Amino acid sequence: MNNNILYLPFQLPRPRRSPRSAQQIMAEEIRQLKQKSFCQLSECLGKFIPAQFLYPASSGPLSRRRIYSKENTFWAFLSQVLDADGGCKEVIRKVQAFAALKLEKLPCSSTAAYCKARQKLDQDSLESILSHTSHTHIEADLDRLNGRRVIVVDGTGVSMPDTEENQKKWPQQKHQKPGCGFPQAAICACFNLHNGTLLSYEIGNKKSHELPMLRKQWDAFESGDIFLGDKGFCSYYDISGFKNRSVDSVVTLARRKPVSNADAVKVLGKDDLLIEWKKPRRNKRSSYSQEQWEALPEKLLLRQIKVSVSQPGSRTDSFHIITTLLDAEEYPASEIADLYLQRWDVELFFRDIKTTMDMDILRCKTPEMVCKEIIMHFIAYNCIRRLMLGAAEKKDVAVRRISFKGSVQALRQWEPHFNQAKISREEKARLIQLLYDSIAAYIVPERPGRSEPRAVKRRAKHYQLLTAPRHEMKEIQHRSKYRAESA
């Protein structure tokens, strides 16, 4: 047997890889960070937001794949509005936490790059995403009254940082001294009464009334819908406009006296009358033009229902409902009264957005970013509602019985579990299923007749009131004994 192995009296040097330069090491770190996606949220909410909305632009801003790409920036912004802290630093800490799994050196702690990327997000794209999240396609999404969708409308207000640009867009009241108040924006929004999703919105300032803002959202209504509003929306022009769109209205009577039985067209039942309204006169303060007024019908056939309130602690003993649902057999007065009492849910919807999600006081310092911040809050809100609707369908419970705050808390705690370097598809599915179980398990108890007076129990601290710009103010001595004049 021949041994052909060559033995040498010395050892050949092994080929070595040349040491990487600092530039190569940095390039590798950037390459790994560019792959970062806030997948912890996209795994939970990605099915409500199609990926094509977050594709990089063909050219211009957010067209290249960077650390803060269009996809990463959107999910980072959404994560920011869902966080309990809500600051830009929170997003940077998440990027650093992810980088700690793969890199030895953490990325920069500055928020400049992230804030610039947020400014490059296209508002039209965000509007398209919001519109997509408002449309539900779940069989359990049943409507409120005889299979018809009920859209409830109301308005609210938010404040924002006191900057010169914000003051020009949303000025404060005239009696407020400069530098002592905050810009105030008015929001009028339409919600699906059954599942709570936000369908449309309009932003105005202190001079914007809810009715003109509602008219800009008429396209959100479809034929066969029912419009539900309080006395601020009791308008001849708007009831007629909705009727022309085959949309029925249910509102509280305002600015007109109730019609008596003697003046009614027909008595349908006890406290249930068929009435006629004459077209009102137009004055210079009317929000519609002369041509629009002339196009209105001379009379409107309506239905007036008197609702008696027997619950102790109520602010009123009775009120009147005006509606275009004229068929008393198909729409009994008791069902319409019960539908209007459910209008209070819109107050809870706004509370979920403003209080639970901290949109009451915005953070952005320019009008453009304020609008984007509001849209992102609405997108996050709709995604949470979609999660609640899915959990309600799986567990066969009423979606309005599921706690919104409990759902937000569950999503916040489940989010870090998806931010792992390696996680299988089966594990992701298991975690999402457990998330649905956790959301559906938090049921709000029914408490009929519960009275919650609008009163503040916790006393405010005795701080001096800001009655002049901050740089001109001087602190009062012994401020612990200070009492405001209005107290």
Image: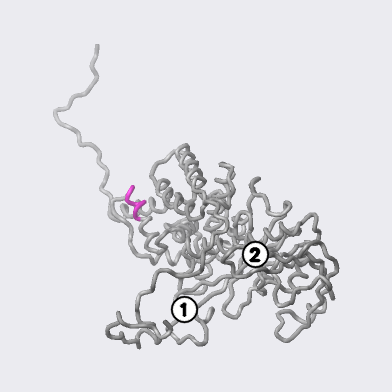
Q: Amino acid at mark 1?
A: Phe
What is the image's colouring? one colour
Going 55% across and 64% down the picture, which residue do you hit? 350
Is residue 220 in the magenta section? no
Q: Which residues are magenta?
A: 96-101
Res. 59 visible in picture: no
Question: Which of the labelled discs sits on residue 230, or is there none?
Answer: none
Q: Main secondary structure of the magenta part?
A: helix
Question: Would you identify the image quadrant in which residue 227 lies?
Answer: bottom right
Question: Which of the labelled discs sits on residue 309, or is there none?
Answer: 2
**How far across and how far down the image is residue 245, in percent?**
77, 64
Looking at this view, is 244 or 346 the one in front? 346
Q: Name above or below for residue 12 compared with residue 441.
A: above
Question: Closer to the N terminus: mark 2 or mark 1?
Answer: 1
Is residue 99 in the magenta section? yes
Looking at this view, is 92 or 456 the one in front? 456
Give the crowd class for mark 1: few <14, some 14-19, many >=20 residues within 10 Å. Answer: many
**How far across and how far down the image is residue 475, in percent?**
30, 85
- Left or right: residue 410 compared with residue 151: left
Res. 174 visible in picture: yes
Q: Secondary structure at mark 2?
A: loop
Residue designated by label 1: 182
